[in-house]
Amino acid sequence: MPLPQPPDTPPPPAPPPGRHRAQLSPQDWIDAALAHLVDHTIDAVRVDVLARRMKVTRGSFYWHFTDRDDLLKRLLQSWRRTTTEQVIARFQGHDQDPAVVLRELLQLPAHGRTAAQASSVELAIREWARRDPTAREVLEDVDNRRLNYFAECFVALGHSAEEARHRAFMLYGCIISDSLLSSGGNDAQREARLACVHSLLVRAR
């Protein structure tokens, strides 16, 4: 038998009609927002549009988010976590040769469909950041976090801190360019190009 609600406590909201709220997680909404961002622009990422895309009511959204701004902030946090913090943590969790780590990081843009999707998301967020200070702040944090990690790898290979920063910037520029350019050639050409970059920046002393 359920306990009665205290008199000063409002009853919980009723689940929205259609799909039950338990069937959707915050990440479902974030993924839908990311997909819509890639297909359109940040202006098109609205609660009513996402609800239609997901075939649920708008009420389902408010079980997880305060408003649209809350969704967008958590979208940026999720993107930063999955594309940067989790990637770095995965490499830091193993005692690997820094040269091997940098080679694997260079190859990330070449990892098939997943990499292509990640590149599309990153391009959309970079476009968003040109117009929005919150997105720009997160993007700058992400860029700095990645650059600092690359520099740490170069320092571990014996380069000075200044030289490591220069090489990290060049390496990162190659990764970003390779992930965003659509005219990068076939897989064999891409692998050869990345091997050349690795040889020039990582092996050279």
Image: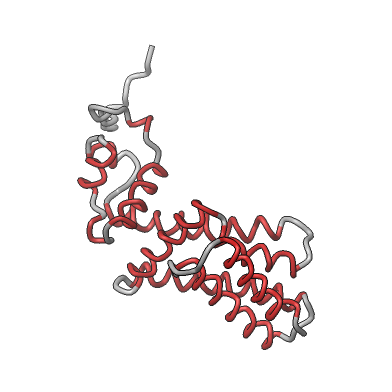
On the picture, is 202 further left or further right than 6?
right
Residue 117 in percent (x, y) is at: 44, 55
Which percent across, then down, holds residue 174? 55, 75
Picture residue at 35% right of the left edge, 42% below the top: 64
The part of the image, by quadrant, that contains residue 106 is bottom right
Question: In the rendered view of the protein, which quadrant contains the C terminus?
Answer: bottom right
Color encoding of the figure: secondary structure
Q: Residue at x 31, y 70 (%)?
A: 132
Of residues 132 and 177, the one nearer the viewer is 177
Give the total of numbered labels.
Answer: 0
Judge whether 173 appears above or below 8 on screen. Answer: below
> Up-down: is 4 above or below 15?
above
Task: Establish if 21 lies above or below 158.
Answer: above
Residue 58 sits in quarter: top left
Q: Residue furthest top?
A: 1
Tell which of 95 and 109 is nearer to you: 109
- In percent of width and height, residue 27 lies at 42, 44
Residue found at the far left of this picture? 48
Q: Quadrant of the N terminus?
A: top left
**Residue sitting at x 28%, y 61%:** 42
Q: Determine the image quadrant of residue 159.
A: bottom right
Tell me if 63 is positioned left or right of 201 in this view: left
Residue drawn at the location 75% of the way across and 68% of the way down: 98
Residue placed most toward the observer, 128 or 100: 100
